[in-house]
Image (cartoon, coloured by chain):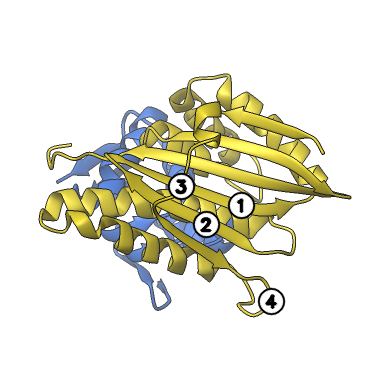
Chain colours: A yellow, B blue
């Protein structure tokens, strides 16, 4: 069993002992695109509740958690192989953390690791503009902007763990963290 | 012309295209009809064309790619002045719309 870690190693090891754990079960739910929006709305609502006293603060935190959750779950739904999607999320001090685990095939794993290596070797803001220009000049079927917008526009921290889990199967665990703007001016 | 479902509505009136609601479609193919509607406004109007996003509560990254592609389309047309009207009320707009200015510095980005 091989294991590859990309991104921020400490984040990949972070504990989620106090938080919410949701499993989107393959089969009974007929997992599809709309589950990402529904699930990220739920996570954003539940996790931003402690900040409801301040309208501006709540709107910012609700949005940032919603955007991050939606992008990570969209990726899981889009690229997964049959199997459950396991989602953990928690707030520790002033940081929101989220972890999404799903199965992918080995080709997807290899392609994704190459994309990540490129993404992690450059300045995300510059890479975002470069990717947008490339998308406009091609008929790409995906935008590839989800992770780049999280890094460039939301200052998210990210880590990915790829673990071989069987023939043509890799378990991908994505962990992300966001510093919460705890002042309403933030 | 109008494109809508239970979560969003996009429609054109004269030189203005309005985007309302929550937009999180699955990728460039799913956004293609919206791209066509907004690109038609860029091609059929001379002078000012306005994309009004003040009612667009949420946009996923594929939708941000759509806005970027439309901005690049406007950049190619020297007779069009693209105005993007947004609001700081929805946090994604303050975070992601300034990137469009990097693509096209002549874009008139109005974030109220």
Residue A32 at x, y percent in the picture? 60, 70
In this rendering, position of residue B29 left or right of residue B51: right
Residue at mark 2 to residue at mark 1: CA–CA distance: 7 Å
Disc nearer the start of the sequence (3/4)? 3
Residue under circle 1?
A101
Q: Are marks 2 and 3 on the same chain?
A: yes
Q: Residue at x 70, y 39 (%)?
A: A162
Residue under circle 2?
A87
Q: Are marks 3 and 4 on the same chain?
A: yes
Residue at mark 2 to residue at mark 4: CA–CA distance: 17 Å
Q: Label 1 near label 2: C-beta < 8 Å?
A: yes
Determine whether the residue tagged by mark 2 lies in a helix, strand or loop.
strand
Quarter that holds the C terminus of chain A: top left
Q: Nearer the viewer, mark 2 or mark 3?
A: 3
Residue under circle 4?
A27
Disc nearer the start of the sequence (3/1)? 3
Q: Are marks 2 and 4 on the same chain?
A: yes
């Amino acid at each position: 069993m091989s294991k590859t870690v990309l991104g921020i190693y400490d984040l990949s090891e972070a504990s989620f002992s106090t938080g919410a754990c949701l499993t989107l079960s393959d089969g009974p739910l007929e997992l599809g695109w709309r589950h990402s929006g529904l699930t990220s709305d739920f996570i954003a609502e539940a996790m931003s509740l402690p900040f409801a006293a301040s309208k501006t603060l709540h709107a910012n935190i609700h949005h940032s958690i919603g955007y991050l959750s939606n992008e990570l779950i969209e990726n899981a739904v889009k690229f997964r192989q049959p199997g459950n999607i396991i989602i953990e999320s928690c707030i520790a001090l002033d940081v929101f953390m989220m972890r999404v685990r799903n199965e992918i095939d080995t080709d997807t794993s290899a392609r994704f690791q190459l994309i990540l290596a490129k993404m992690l070797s450059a300045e995300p803001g510059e890479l975002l503009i470069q990717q947008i220009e490339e998308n406009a000049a091609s008929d790409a079927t995906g935008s590839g902007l989800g992770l780049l917008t999280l890094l460039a526009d939301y200052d998210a921290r990210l880590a990915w763990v790829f673990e071989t889990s069987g023939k043509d199967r890799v378990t991908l665990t994505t962990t992300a963290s966001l510093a919460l703007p705890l002042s309403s001016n933030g | 012309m109008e494109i809508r479902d239970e979560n969003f509505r996009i429609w054109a009136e004269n030189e203005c295209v309005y985007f309302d609601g929550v937009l999180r479609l699955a990728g460039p193919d799913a956004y293609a009809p919206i791209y066509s509607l907004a690109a038609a406004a860029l091609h059929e109007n001379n002078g000012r064309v306005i994309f009004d996003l003040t009612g667009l509560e949420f946009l996923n990254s594929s939708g941000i790619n759509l806005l970027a592609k439309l901005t690049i389309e406007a950049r190619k047309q020297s007779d069009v002045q693209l105005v993007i009207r947004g609001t700081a009320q929805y946090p994604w707009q303050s975070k992601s719309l300034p990137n469009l200015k990097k693509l096209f510095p002549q874009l008139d980005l109005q974030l109220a």
